[in-house]
Structure formats: C-alpha cells, structure tokens
Image (cartoon, rainbow, N blue to C red):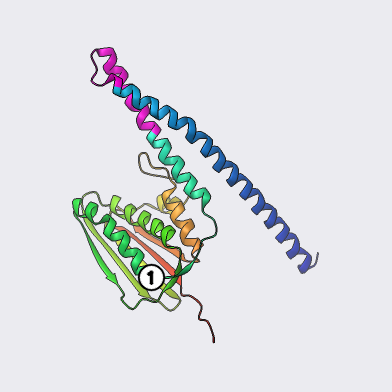
Amino acid sequence: MTGESSSAENQTINQRLLEQYNEIAQLAGSLAHEIKNPLSVIRMNMDLLAEELDPPQTTAERRALQKTKVVQEQCVRLQNLLDDFLRFARLRQLNLLPGSLNEQVSRVLDFVSAQAEKQGIEIVRYLDPDLPSINLDAETLYSALLNLVINAIQAMPDGGTLMVRTQETRHGVALGLIDTGCGMNEETALHMFDAFYSTKDGGSGLGLPLARKIIDAHQARIDVQSELGRGTKFTLEFPKPARISG
C-alpha cells in the first residue's frame, strides 16, 4: 500500500468516525431534551405537593414533605446535569473575532468578587495593560474562564489567595490562575477533564471538560500543575492573530 492510498484511507476512516460522532451527539442531545420535558412536569408537581403539605399537620404529612423535598433536590440536580450536558453537546464551531483577554478575565473576576470576599479569598490581579488582542468568542470564553475560577474558589473554602496574571509570551498570550487551595492528587489531575468525572458531591462532571473543549476551540493550550494541600496552577496560552500582510 502506497503512502498516498494509506493517507486517503485514513481520511475516509476519520470522516466516517466524525459522522458517527456527530450522529451520536445529535441523538444524545435529543434524548436530553426528551428527558427535560417529563422532568419539568415531575418537578412542577413536586413543588405543588410541597406547597400543599407545608406546614405539615401530622407525622405522616411531615414524612411525606421530607420525601417530597428529596425528590425536588434530585430533580434540580438532574436539571443542572442536563443543562450542562446540552451546553457540552452543542458546542460547535465558534465565531472567533479579535478581542481582549483582559476584558473577559476582568468580567469573571468582578462577577465572583463578592463570593471570594465572603470566603476570605484575596484575588490578586496582574493584567498586562499592553496585552495583544486574541481571536475569541466572548461568551463561550467567559463561560470557560468562569468555570476555572469557580473551581479555584471552591478549592479554598477556608480562604486563601487567587493570583491571576496575563502576559505576552513568545508564542502568544498567556493567562495564569494560581490558587492556594486543597490541590489535587495525581489521579484527579489525570481525569479532571474527563466527562462526568467529579470529586464534588452533586457535581455533573461536565464543567471542566466543557471549559477544556472551549479552550481547544480557541486553538489554545491548557496546562495544569497541582500539589495536594498546596494549590493548583492553570496556564492557558492563546495564539496571537496572524498579521495581515499588506
């Protein structure tokens, strides 16, 4: 078999695999939608039942109300899981336009500042004012960065420091997120971007995989360094837009 025919065969196989993946993703998204409809009905009826039982008049009603609340909590958890899954499954080609990484980072940090202060977390910003623009899709990148920052904040329930730095590098534009949180062991660090892998109670396991998918779609790379008990460092590096020769 010649190299040319082997390459053509590999392209055919890759195209077939891509078509199968897209078909499975479409079916999964449709299934998630079909689940959401009856789930909404169940949740609505549980809410109505809880209203009728509150306040409970008898021991039996008290037990019934407790069981109703358990179902309500699980409905909310499933709803959040389905929403995360649909966001994950829907991500396709992004509309990348020149924009400011600093602006998106600042939006995220402003949004979480109240929660960080409440937890005793100091956010230290080192945002390079002369940072070159990058090609980005503003809303999806914001979502990915928010996920990473929230992950860092959740790793510091008793307070700590989150240092956020942007800078130009030889190959592009870098963002560093360094927290002084609980860190990760080797197994968690290895699987943190796997879909449905989560070490948090009630977590969907899709937040970090979705963030990774968005970062990949920006042609950026992500590197993670973590030490148990000492903290975690995320480094994202985005390519600079190609110069247009005139």
Magenta residue check for 74: yes
Taking 38 as reference, is 182 left or right?
Answer: left
Looking at the picture, how far across and down is residue 242, in whole percent?
51, 78
Q: Residue furthest right?
A: 1
Taking 126 as reference, is 213 left or right?
Answer: right
Looking at the picture, how far across and down is residue 9, in whole percent?
75, 60
Whether 117 is drawn above or below 131: the answer is above
Question: Viewer-proximal residue, 90 or 152?
Answer: 90
- The N terminus appears in which quarter of the rendering? bottom right
Q: Residue at x 43, y 55 (%)?
A: 211
- The C terminus appears in which quarter of the rendering? bottom right
How many numbered dots are placed on residues in this image? Answer: 1
Q: Residue at x 37, y 25 (%)?
A: 46
Whether 3 is drawn above or below 140: the answer is below
Looking at the picture, how far across and down is residue 62, in whole percent?
26, 17
Report which residue position mark 1 lands on.
100
Residue 205: name its quadrant: top left
Taking 26 as reference, is 157 left or right?
Answer: left
Looking at the picture, how far across and down is residue 223, in whole percent?
42, 63
Does the rendering let one see residue 105? yes
Magenta residue check for 58: yes
Q: Which residues are magenta?
A: 52-75
Dot 1 lies on which element?
Answer: loop
Does the rendering let one see residue 230? no
Residue 161: name its quadrant: bottom left
Q: Residue at x 64, y 54 (%)?
A: 18
